[in-house]
Image (cartoon, rainbow, N blue to C red):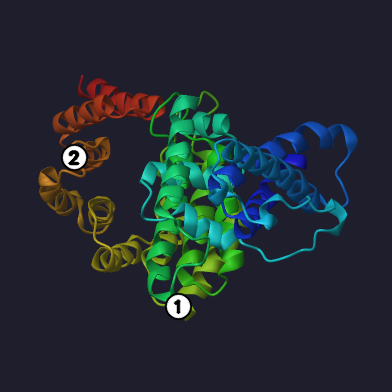
Amino acid sequence: MVEDLLRQFAPQVLGSLVRRYGHFDLAEDAVQEALLAAALQWPEQGIPENPRGWLITVAVRRLTDELRSDEARRRREERAAAELPREHVETPPDPEQVPAGEDDTLTLFFLCAHPALSPASQLALTLRAVGGLATAEIARAFLVPDATIAQRISRAKQQIKASHIPFTLPAESERAERLTVVLHVLYLIFNEGYTASSGPDLQRGELTSEAIRLAREVRRLLPDDGEVAGLLALMLLTDARRAARTRADGSLVPLAEQDRERWNGSYIEEGVALVTDALARSPLGPYQLQAAIAAVHDEAAQAADTDWPQILVLYELLERISPNPMVTLNHAVAVAMVKGPQAGLELLGPLDDDRRLAEHHRLDAVRAHLLEMAGDRAAARSSYRRAARRTTSLAERRYLEARANRLTSDAR
């Protein structure tokens, strides 16, 4: 309960401070201190009547203390010209008197996804500033040292400060491009949670849940955007399968072998409704198409009932409007399921020369699967083993090795 409230209010509190005082770096630090204070005090003392007001008051107090200290230092150094305006050192508000105010969460999303920041910094800053996650939580999510995440966040805040990026919604001409970055950041967060890039576990539910929560927030702020709806639908329809993707020992269960009774029916229902509505009234976009593909999979009562011809059409559309090697890879699987494995293998050939995917384990894994379908067990076994060597996910490596070993046993 407390943790949910803190994550809900974190971006609102930060947005309020930055809009009023500027100083994104100092404001973000102040909000983190306020969140920590709430996490320690609220479980024992109870949640205040106006939790948002409480957080703003504590954060303002921390921020003004820091600004006053900075001002005093400047005065001691006889730099009177740099003294802060009066409003920067005003008395913190009474927490019960803080009004609902303007919700600056969308502005904060756009700021965290500013093109001046590196993709790694965008991810870290979004989870910290908008998600309300602590540095240690983000580090655990991406399996990197706390210091690495701290450096990324620090660099991002310094970049915002040095670039004088204003805390305002981008101009209409820039908004679509910036929204694309926001959605891509959330997509990357979700993907890292759904299939961890490294480590012993296949998936991290806390990360997919956070991505879905943030996508819901963007959807609340932009209810008429088809791609926002499409991304949320894609996340729900994909995450619906999470419980069936692993066995009790953590080993991977491929889609065709999953127990569909364990899929999350409410997520599927919500996701299908979202993408159906978006496709009916919005310009076609890649997230909507990916969600539509996920919906076709999820609506099949069993793997044999999957409408692969429909999926093939959707991948052809997706490759037309958003071509990239991963789309081609998945397109090849759909082609194999409709036209036979050899047709799918032919589509994989050009990917060997694409530097973005040539060394990726998924290319070898898909090729192995199609070779197995084609009956070329020796070549499939070799590709499975190459894919296993290239992946950094322990669960995927064990699955790929098991597939290779099974082909070895069948050959005896």
Q: In this view, does 333 lie above or below 249?
A: below
Judge the density around disc 1: few (<14), some (14-19), many (≥20) Cα neighbours within 10 Å.
Answer: some
Quadrant (top left, top right, bottom left, bottom right) of the C terminus: top left
SS under mark 2 = helix
For the question of whether residue 31 can be seen, the reply is no
Quadrant (top left, top right, bottom left, bottom right) of the N terminus: top right
Judge the density around disc 2: few (<14), some (14-19), many (≥20) Cα neighbours within 10 Å.
Answer: many
Q: Position of residue 378 (x, y in %)?
A: 15, 29
Residue sitting at 89 percent across and 35 percent down?
A: 45
Residue sitting at 37 percent across and 66 percent down?
A: 177
Q: Name the residue under label 2.
A: 371
Q: Where is residue 325 in the image (x, y as percent from the top left)?
A: 22, 51
SS under mark 1 = loop
Question: Mark 2, mark 1: which one is toward the viewer?
Answer: 1
Asked where in the image residue 133 lies, by quadrant, the reply is top right
Residue sitting at 36 percent across and 64 percent down?
A: 286
Q: Mark 1 points at which residue?
A: 282
Asked where in the image residue 371 lies, by quadrant, the reply is top left
Tell me the CA gap for discs 2 and 1.
Answer: 39 Å
For the image, the number of numbered tags is 2
Q: Where is residue 302 in the image (x, y as percent from the top left)?
A: 47, 51
The amino acid type found where label 1 is placed reads: Ser
**Left or right: 14, with 232 as reference point:** right
Asked where in the image residue 285 lies, by quadrant, the reply is bottom left
Q: Which of 177 and 246 is in front in this view?
A: 177
**Left or right: 157, with 380 as reference point:** right
For the question of whether residue 189 can be seen, the reply is yes
The amino acid type found where label 2 is placed reads: Leu
Q: Nearer the viewer, residue 361 or 180?
A: 180
Residue sitting at 52 percent across and 23 percent down?
A: 249
Q: Which of 39 and 201 is in front in this view?
A: 39
